[in-house]
Every structure is written in C-alpha cells, then in structure tokens.
Amino acid sequence: MLGLNACNNNKNQQNTLEQIKAKDSIRIGVFSDKPPFGFVNEEGKNDGFDVYIAKRFAKDLLGDENKVQFVLVEAASRVEFLRANKVDIIMANFTQTPEREEVVDFAKPYMKVSLGVVSKDGAIQSVDDLKGKKLIVNKGTTADAFFTKHHPDIELLKYEQNTEAFMALKDERGDALAHDNTLVLAWAMENPGFSVGIPSLGEEEVIAPAVKKGNTELKDWLDNEITTLANEGFLKEAYIKTLAPIFGEEKMDSVLITK
C-alpha cells in the first residue's frame, strides 16, 4: 500500500476512457479469496460473479473480454488502490457507504447486501449472544465498521484476508464471523457444522463498482453500461452462471438489482 505522500502525488492522475482505450487494457480490482464473487479457481484464473461482469466491461469498452487486467486487492486496500491509480475500477464486492462516498465515486449498483453472522452450529443467534465472545471480521469491511461503531463492547479479531478470517473461525480462535450475508451463507453451505444464525443485520445496502474520485467520464460510462446489462438480462445470466449453484435461482431477486 502506498503511503500518504505517494497518494498525494497521484491525486490528479486518473485514467479517462480515452486513456484506457489508448492503453487497450483496463485494470479492475477484484478479490482472490471471496467465492463465489471473486476468487482464483483451480486453474489459477480469476473467477466469480464480479469477474464475470468485469470481463463484459472489457468486451464492451475494448472489444475483447481478455483485455482486462485483474488486480488482486484486500478489503482494506480497495480505496487506496483507486486513490493511488493502481486500478481503474474496483469490482471487489464493494458496499456503497456514506463514508466511502467521500473518497471514491460509485457507479450504479448491481447487488443488494446486508451483514450476516456465521458460527459453529449456528450458536450465535443474536448480537446479545456475542457479548463476552470474540467476533472475527475483515479489516476495512462494513462488518468491521458496523460493530466498531454500534457495538464497541464486542471484542473483534481483525484479519486482512478472507481465507485467514474463515480459518480462524474453523480453528475456534473466535466464536463467530461477521461479513456480507451473501458470503457467509455461501461459505456455510460449503462447510458442514457451521450455519448463519444471524442472516440479516443492520440496514440493507448496495454493492457497486467504484472509480477514483472525480473520474466522472468513467463513472458515467459504467452507469450506462450497468443499465444496459440489466435491461438485456446479462446480470441475471451472470447470477445463473456463478451464484445460482450456491444460492439457487429462487434467491436471484433478493440479491440482484436489475432496474
């Protein structure tokens, strides 16, 4: 991660549409360890719902889905990667919040999300059940911010990577793990013995692509692109291809934003 001075040096740098076209490549930040949204598959290739959509961005902008350069990010580094001009777009399951809106620009959202809490045998059924226990979160996530702000009495164990966080839960270093409800539901389905005792916590929020603050040209292109993809049914196609095997087609309307 670049320091503050490096960020200031890059403050006025941003890749416009014409610059991206001139480079004939677009850099999109995604997760490497958050299946089924963004992960590296067994063949060593980027995969998942966000990746599926990102490839379409490259195809529509540059004529070839292979002209996307995937940049792997952690939750806490997403804003910094935009500010330091390391990526053109963040597609790493980025929840839109008022705090983040102050430092990056969000395009039109494509998903709905709230927080969820997973634990062994679903033992944690309410926030009160977390009192006196250790809750695992990822640094820089909405779960981290929510519990830090609203429940400062709950002890948080913070990890950089999703894989570290979920391993800590399996190793019983913490009593429960809080993250996006879509993620913890998917993880629990793949890990017998764990279940989501709190399926929805806090207000429902949205997930959207983000660009560097002030990059209006790229944001406007993304707004139009997402509207087009929603209208033609591509977002539903992406869901069926990547998320339906986990959540089922019946939950599509509760996850996608298609208007």
Image (cartoon, rainbow, N blue to C red):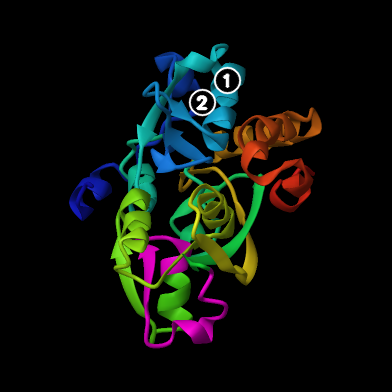
Q: Residues within 10 Å of mark 1 (few under 14, many from 20)?
A: many
Which region shows up in magenta?
122-144
Q: Position of residue 48 (x, y in %)?
A: 53, 34
Q: Amino acid at mark 2?
A: Leu
User: Could you tell me which secondary element the residue under label 1 belongs to?
Assistant: helix
Res 96 → quadrant? bottom right
| Magenta stretch contains residue 131 | yes
Report the mark closest to the observer, 1 or 2.
1
* Residue 178 relative to residue 74: left or right: right
C-alpha span from label 1 to label 2: 9 Å
Residue 10 - label: none
Question: Of 59 and 248, which appears nearest the observer?
Answer: 248
Q: Residue at 32% of width from left, 36% of height from top? A: 86
Above or below, 21 against 245 in this view is: above
Q: Position of residue 221 (x, y in %)?
A: 62, 32
Taking 69 as reference, is 211 left or right?
Answer: right
Drawn side of residue 103 relative to residue 37, left or right: left
Q: Which residue is the site of mark 1?
A: 61
Q: Residues within 10 Å of mark 2 (few under 14, many from 20)?
A: some
Image quarter for residue 218? top right
The quadrant of the rendering that contains the C terminus is: top right
Residue occupying image coordinates x 43% and y 56%: 103
Is residue 249 covered in magenta?
no
Earlier sequence position, callout 1 versus callout 2 = 2
Instruction: Mark 1 and mark 2 in contact? Answer it, CB < 8 Å.
Output: yes
Residue 90 visible within the image: no
Q: Dot 2 lies on which element?
A: helix
User: Residue 237: x percent and y percent?
Assistant: 71, 29
Answer with left or right where residue 200 lies relative to residue 143: right
Q: Residue furthest top?
A: 63
Classify 215 as above or below 127. above
